[in-house]
Structure formats: structure tokens, C-alpha cells
Image (cartoon, rainbow, N blue to C red):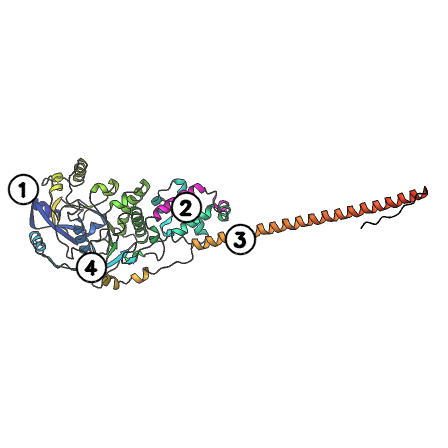
Amino acid sequence: MADKTTFSEDILSGYAMEGESIVVGGAMLDGECISDHFIKIPLKTLNRHGLIAGATGTGKTKSLQVIAEQLSNHGIPSMIMDIKGDLSGIAVPSSGHKKIDERHEAIGLPFEPGASPVEFLSLSNEKGARLRATVSEFGSILLSKILNLSEVQSGILSVLFKYCDDNRIPLLDLKDLKKILQFATDDAGKEELEQEYGKISSRSTSTILRKIVELESQGAERFFGEVSFNIADLVRYSDEGKGMVSILRLTDIQGKPKLFSSFMLQLLAEIYSVMPEEGDLDKPKFALFIDEAHLVFSEASDALLDHIETIIKLIRSKGVGIFFITQNPTDIPDSVLSQLGLKVQHALRAFTAKDRKAIRTAAQNFPLTDYYKTDELLTSMGIGEALVTCLNEDGIPTPLAHTLMRAPQSRMDVLSSKEIDSIIAKSEIIEKYNKEVDRESAFEILNKKIQDYNEAVEEEEEESARQKERSSSSSRSKKKDGFLQSKAAKNIGKEIGNVAIRGLLGVFGVKTRRRKFF
């Protein structure tokens, strides 16, 4: 049995924070929670990102809910990817429960019900403000990585984007992108593009087109377009100064990993490009929670993973914290996992040899401790318990703590459809983003170019045919005149001959007469 006094001293000193912090639960030793030994996370280091992991049903979603609502209470807006649809309850206060009271009594922390201001968002037909981005905003580089294009194909896509920029042709949605690919190899545009940018292979454009169709089959046409979402609408506050919690409802997206990863990468890239450099702040300006994070990485190419790793490294300087929620830490690439300062690890299940190997690997991701056998504890923790470590205000990992997690202040259940409608009705942004906009863009402009070209070709062919007909007619007329002249000459010659003959016969006393033909 571990020394309780030494453990108490290590926990109290390791989690003594001078600046603002949030309490996520109470420290446990030998299966019991030690009252008033709070496990705190300093707000100052929450831009160093984090991981919440654990098997299904172990409480990781409630841990996400706790952290998000505590950030909101401290005036930090956040965005949550709600793939399972069970986080809408953060919008209303908890009605309390006997077990919640018992848990908080053991932690030594009074339970206070509370709600967070919520904005519902959607990528599809779910209720909420629609999130969209234009093809131009994605850019050729990011789009090439999402589509996993070769170097040659990426170069062609860059050329087509450049052509559209040079000629002020907007690329807004996927039909615009497909149209510029068609235009590049069509007679209407091939010569123009080749003169300015070089030859474009029809085989490469066909490959790009097939990959776009694959992305389109997952519903991407709903995401690409206007009105583009403004990142500033994620960083908002309630009248009481609480940070707005934007919940992106994605219950119909689990079978569409390509669409989900496309959206996530564009969002991260947009946040990084739009938000100003902040350096080290006392608390983050914004937090992003990515539930079912394996969907981001499951189909990612090496180039895409490199892009994600780069953004994760750099985006913290913008005052942004990113938190991945997944079942197993091995779902996250090591290059990304190494960037995560906060780790909240709920129980894992060891049903197979592969599971046991994953648990040993997960145990190696935590600081060494004299108080727990980490690999054994990972399989024996109860629901609502987790191993927690974070970075203190000096950036040093805190002692690993087996933690009894606090309960959310908000409802631990989904809202009814009527309750969601009530919240959406009060939205300040839904009218702005849910109107359909389809202004003139590449599809219409290039179609007009192709139509004009085809009409010009048709007109030229008709004129050529007319000229050919006139030439043929003139030739026939000349032949006819020649024929008539030749016939007249022949008749005259014949008549002269007859006269001569008659004259000659007359000399010899031979009479002739004309014959009439009836």
C-alpha cells in the first residue's frame, strides 16, 4: 500500500496553481477518493492541447462536457464536434441526482447546477446554422492533400486555381471545380490554358475528377459553397460573459470520414490563418473539441498527417487549444500525441492480445509514478474515473493522478427536439448562414465560354460550307458556259461544212435538198 502522506503532499504541491484553473475532480489512492485534493488544470497551458480517451461507456464524453462548461464559465468560447448527439444537454442545468451529490461529497466540492450558452451548427440537414466554405478558401494545396493527389495532379490543380484567380472566375462549389477540369481539356479552353500555363494532361484531370466525385458521394457538395462561415462567429460571449459553446451536430457523418476530415482540416487552417498571433496568454481564446478523432486520421495520407501535425504545433500561438476525444490513444498518430499536454485517460478494455498491447503502449504515455501500476489501473478503473496529468504553469507535467471526475453542472442527457428548436429560435447567426446563395461563378462563366466557342465554331463551319457551295456553284456555271460555247462552235462548223459540200456538189451538177424532221 502506498504512503498516503507522501501521496497527499505530492498531489497538493503538484496541483497548486497560482493563476486561474479549472477543477476536474479529486485524487484517488488505493481506490478511495481523498477529500479536498483537487485535480486542477491551469488555464494558462490549455493551449498546449489535450487528449480524452477511454472505452465506450467509461465517461469520456462527460469529461469533455465538464471541461467545456468550465471553460465557458471562465469566459472561454469553444466548439464541440458532437458526432454521437449526446452533448446538447450542456445547454440546460442539471436537475441533480443522489449519486452526483455522493460523488461531489467524496471529492469535497459542492455541486452547483448550471448551463452554458449554446449555438447549434450543422454540416448537413441537422438543425442549426449551416457551416460552409468555398473551394477557393480551401485552396489548391489543402484540397490536393485531402484528395491525396500526386505531385503532377497537384500541380495541375494549382494551375487551374491560378487561371481562375487571374481571370476573376470564382470557385465556390464542387460543380465549379468540376467545370474548370472539363474546360481545361475541352477545345474551348485547352488552347488558351496551354498558351499561358503549359499543356494539361486529360488523364490527370480525369483522375482528379474521379476523386472529387468520391468526395462528393459523402455529401461534400453541401459543405462547399456560400455563405462562408466566419470564424469570428465561434468566438462569442453571452451577456453574462460566459464563452459560447458551439455544438456542431454530426450524427449523420460517422460513415463519411473523408467529409469530416476535410471539414476539420479546413477549419483548423482557417483558424490559424485568421486569428492573430497571441503568444503565451493567461488563458486560451478558443478551444476545439474533436470527438471520435480517429475519423480525422483513419483515411489521412502521409502528406495530410504532416499538415495536421504542423497546424497542431503552430496553432497554440494563436491562443487556441485542441482536444482529441477517442477510444484509444493509439488512434492518434504519435507525432500528434506527443504535442498534447493534457491527458485524461478513462478505463480501457483488454479483450484481445492486441488490446493488451495497446494498454501497455498507453501506459508508457504517462509520467512514471510510485503510487500506481498504470497498466493494471487502466483496466480496473470504474465509470467516471480517469488517470489525469497536465502541464503546470511552468510547462512541467503534473503528477499522474487517479481521479474521481466531477459531474457536469449541466444535464447529462440529450435535449428534446422541442428544446433544440427553442434554442435555435434565439440564434443570432442562423438567418445569416441558412439562406441559399448561388451567384455567378466558374460553372456559369465557363459554360458561357464553352457555349460561345461552340457557336463560333459552328458559325465558322457554316461559313466554310457556304463558301464551298459558292465555289462549287461557280465551277458548275463555268463548265456549262464552256459546254454551250463548244456546242455552238461545233454547230457553226457543221453548217459551214454542209454549205461547202453543197457548193462543191453543185459544181459537179449534183442537186441537193433540205430534209425536214417531224
Distance of label 2 from label 3 (alpha carbons): 30 Å
- Element under label 1? loop
Q: CA distance from mark 3 to mark 1?
A: 89 Å
Cα–Cα gap, marks 3 and 4:
58 Å
Q: Amino acid at mark 4?
A: Ser
Q: Check disc 2 and give the amino acid type.
A: Ser
Callout 4 secondary element = loop
- Which residue matches tag 2? 158
Residue at the image position 5 percent from the left and 44 percent from the top: 4
Q: Give the crowd class for mark 2: few <14, some 14-19, many >=20 residues within 10 Å.
A: some
The percent position of residue 505, horizontal first and vertical second, equals 92, 42
Q: Does residue 363 appear left or right of residue 148 in this picture? A: left
Q: Which residues are magenta?
A: 194-216
**Looking at the picture, which amino acid does disc 3 mark?**
Glu
Magenta stretch contains residue 398: no
Q: Which residue corresponds to mark 4?
A: 416
Give whichever of 201, 104 is nearer the camera: 201
Give how far across and how far down residue 133 sits, in percent. Answer: 34, 53
Task: Looking at the image, tell me whether mark 2 or mark 3 is earlier in sequence order.
Answer: 2
Marker count (numbered): 4
Which circle, 2 or 3, is nearer the viewer? 3
Residue 3's disc number: 1
Q: Main secondary structure of the magenta part?
A: helix
Gap between marks 2 and 1, in whole Å?
Answer: 63 Å
Mark 2 or 1: the one toward you: 2
- Tell me the quarter of the picture where residue 498 sits: top right
Location of mark 3 (residue): 455
Estimate the spatial distance between the alpha carbons at disc 4 and disc 1, rounded to whole Å.
Answer: 49 Å
Q: In front of the other: label 4 or label 2?
A: 4
First in residue order: circle 2 vs circle 1: 1
Q: Residue furthest top?
A: 353
- Under circle 3, the secondary element is helix
